[in-house]
Amino acid sequence: MLVTEKKRNQPAGYAGALLRVDLTTGRLWEQPIDDEFARSYVGGTGMGARILYDEVGADVQWNDPENRLILATGPLAGTPTWGSGGLSVVTKGAITGGATSTQANGFFGANIKSSGFDGIVFQGRSDQWVYLYIHNGTAELRDASHLLGLDTWETQDHLYEELGLSGHQLSVYSIGPSGENLIRFAGIQGDYGHVASKNGCGAVMGSKRVKAVAIVRGNRGIYVADPRGVFRTADDIAYQMRTELPGQNFYLIGTLGGVTGLAPVGGLPIKNLTTNILPAEADMSKWEPMELREGFDHRGHQCNACGMHHCHMQVIRDGVHAGDVVDEPEYEGWVGAGWAWGCTDRTKVSWMNTQCDRAGVDVNEFGWVIGWVMECYEKEYLTRQDLGGIQAVWGDADAAYELLQMLCTRQGFGDVLAEGIKRAAEHLGGPAQDCAVYTMKGSSPRGHDHRALWPEMLDTCVSSTGTLESGGPTRPQELGLPATLQVQSPDDVPRQVALTLGRRHFEDSIGTCFFTTSTTIAAIAEAVSAVTGWNYTKDDAMYLGRRTAALMRAFNLRSGIGPELERPSARYGSTPVDGPAAGVSTAPHWDHMLDTWYELVEYDRESGRPLPELLDRLALPEVKAELWG
Amino acid sequence: MSDAESRLDGSEVTVEVLTWVNRLVGGSGSGSVAFREALEPDDSVESLLRRFSQHHPALHAQLWERDGAITENLHVLVNHKMIGDTHTLRSRLAPGDTVSLLGQFSGG
C-alpha cells in the first residue's frame, strides 16, 4: 500500500526507523532514520556498512557479542518494483573475519517495512535461544527453545502454525542446524528457498542465539514522494526486463541457462575443477533450461511484486524422494549440489540443493567442500575411516548427504569440514591442501569455473564482502566501458571489475533483487528518485556504491585483511588441463591485473587503503583519519 | 561434427548459435543451430558476423550495439575458444573454422 501523506517524520520511501535489539539485555528500541542518513547510505548494504564500520571495533571477532548483525532493506521495498522484498545482511563474517554483504529476497523487505521498520540491528548475545517477532510497529523476543534442531523449512512451518499465519502474511528468516552449531558457512534462509548465504552470516546469528526472525505483513502504508512515478518507473523496468537483454533472459528462465551456457566456455565447474570435459553420462539436452524446468512438476514461487519466471518450486517425480517439494535450484545450486562433485542426476541435485537450504548452509561452499572430500578420497588423502565409514566417491549423492549431516552436527571429521574449505584444507595440509578451491581471504568462489572467467576470479579475490563485490558487467557502456569485454584479457578484466565497483552495492541497498534490476543504473536510480523524491542520477548511484565499498574496505583493513591475501588458492588459480579453456591461466597476469585494478579503484597498491583524495570525494573524513592519520 | 559442418566446401565456415540465443535465428532456444556461411576474401570474425546477422533481424538487433560494437550479452567463440584466446574479432577466418554465439551468463 502506497500512501501520499506522511504519518511521522520519516523520509519518503522509508519506514523511518531501524529496530535495535540488544540480545544481552533484552532491550529493543527504535533508531530513527533521518533524511541525511537515508540519503547518504540509501538502505540495505549501504546502511549496514555504515553501522558495521561505526560500531564494530578491530578486536571484535565474528562470534563476539559486540559484533553486529544487520538485516536491512531499502527504499524500493514494498513498492510495485519487481522483486521488492529485498533483504541485505551485513556483519563481520565467520569465513573471512571481515565485512559481509549477502542478499536474499522473498517478502522480508515488504513485510518489515509495512510493519514499521527499515531494518534490524542485532547486538549482544542472548542467554536463551530466541526468535524475534515483529508486527505492526511492535517487536518482541520470544522463546525459541521449541524450534531448536528444526531445519529452516520446518521452522517456517512451525511458526506459521504457532502464529496462525501463512504465505505472504508472515516472512520467516531462520537458521538451520548449521547455524545453531556455528558452521562457518551457515547462511540465513527464508520464505522457502531464499538464502543470504555468504560469509557465515548464519553462524553469526547462531552465535547470538537467534533462531529466527518472523515478520508479519503489517498494514502501515509506505509514504512515497511520487506515486505515479513509482508505478511508471516500475513498469519501465519491467518492460526492459521483458524485452531487452540481459534482463530478458532472466525474465524467461531465471538462471537455468547457466549449465548449458557456461559449459561451452569452460565456465562450468566439474569435479572440483579437475576437468572441464563433460562426463559421458551427462545428457546435456536434459540440462537445457526448459528441460530443467519441465523435468519437474513446477509452479512459480515469486518474491514480492515480481513478474519474473525466475523462482519456482518443484515436485520430485521419481526415485526415493518422489513427491517431495523442493525449490528449483538456481544455477549455482545445480553446481554446488551436484556438478562441483560430479553428480549430474537432475533429480538428485535438485533434492540435495533443497537439503542444503533446509540445513542452512551456503550451497556454493558446500559444493567445494564435498568436491574436495571426494577428490581427497579418490587420491587416498582421506580414507573411509577418516570419514566415519562414508565412501565418498565422485557423484555419490547419498555420501554427500551423509557428509552434510556430519558437518552440520560437527560429528567426527564433520567438525573439520564445518570450518569451511580453506580451514579444512589447511587442517589436512600437504597435497590435499593443493586440491582445495578458495581465496586466501577464506571465501570460496560462486559456482562458476573462474579459470575461464577471469573477471569473477579477480573480483572474488579483491572483494571486501566475502563474495563477488562488483558482479557481472550489466550494461557496461553506461559506465564508460566498451560493450565487448574479453574475459581472458589481462587488460580488459581489471578495467571491468574496477569500473563497475559500486553498482552492485547500490542495487543491494535499495530493497530489490539484482536479477530484477538487470537494466541500466539510470533506470534504477529513477525508480529510487520517484520513491524518495530525491533526484538520484546514475553518477549518484555509483558514488553511493563506491562509498559503501570504501567503508567495507576500511573495515577489512581494520580487521587485518589486506592486499597480501588477494590471490586464489593453488587449485582455484590453476590452469585448466582440458576443455575449452585448456592452457589459459591468470597466473602470469595476476600482478598486472591487481596493479591495474588498484590504480582504477584509487586504492593504495601496497597497503590496500582507499586513497585520501578518493575518501575526500566520498565525504568520508573519519575513514581518512583512521586510515591515513 | 554437425550436418552443417559435414557439408562444408572449401571456402565455408560454420556459424553455430547455442542455447537461448538460437531463438533469435528461428531455433527452439536450446541446443545448437548451425549454418554454413561462405567466406569472403579477408573475412574477419567480425565481418562474417555482420554479414551473417543481416539475414537474421532478431539476432542483428541484439548482437550489435548502437556504436557498432558487439553486445556484452553474448560470447563469441572461434573453434570453441573464447575470443581473446586464439582469435580476436579482427582475426581472419580460415575455411572450416567454427564461429559460435553463446549467451553471456553471470551470477545466480
Image: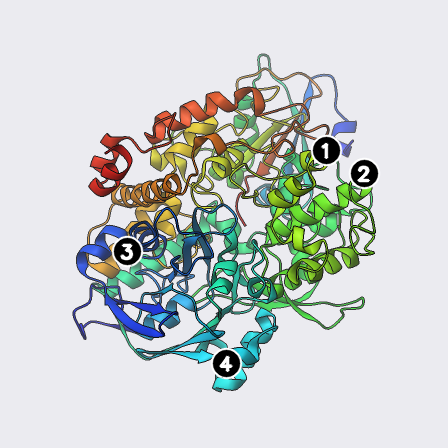
- Please name the residue that numbered disc 2 is placed on: A379
Q: In this view, does A167 lie to the left or right of A418?
A: left
| Element on which disc 1 rests | helix
- Please name the residue that numbered disc 3 is placed on: A528
Q: Which of marks 3 and 4 is in front?
A: 4
- The Cα–Cα distance between marks 2 and 4, rounded to whole angstroms, is 49 Å
Q: Is residue A248 left or right of residue A617?
A: right
Query: Marks 2 and 1: CB-CB under 8 Å?
Result: yes
Splitting the image into 4 quarters, where does residue A607 fall? Answer: top left
- The Cα–Cα distance between marks 2 and 3, rounded to whole angstroms, is 54 Å
Amino acid type of disc 3? Val
Answer with mark 1 or mark 3, whichever residue precedes in sequence: 1
Q: Nearer the viewer, residue A598 or A422?
A: A422
Q: Which of marks 2 and 3 is in front?
A: 2
- The Cα–Cα distance between marks 1 and 3, rounded to whole angstroms, is 51 Å
Amino acid type of disc 1? Pro
The chain letter under disc 3 is A
Q: Residue furthest top?
A: B41
Answer with mark 1 or mark 4, whichever residue precedes in sequence: 4
- Please name the residue that numbered disc 1 is placed on: A431
Q: How crowded is mark 1: few (under 14 residues within 10 Å), some or many (20 or more)?
A: few
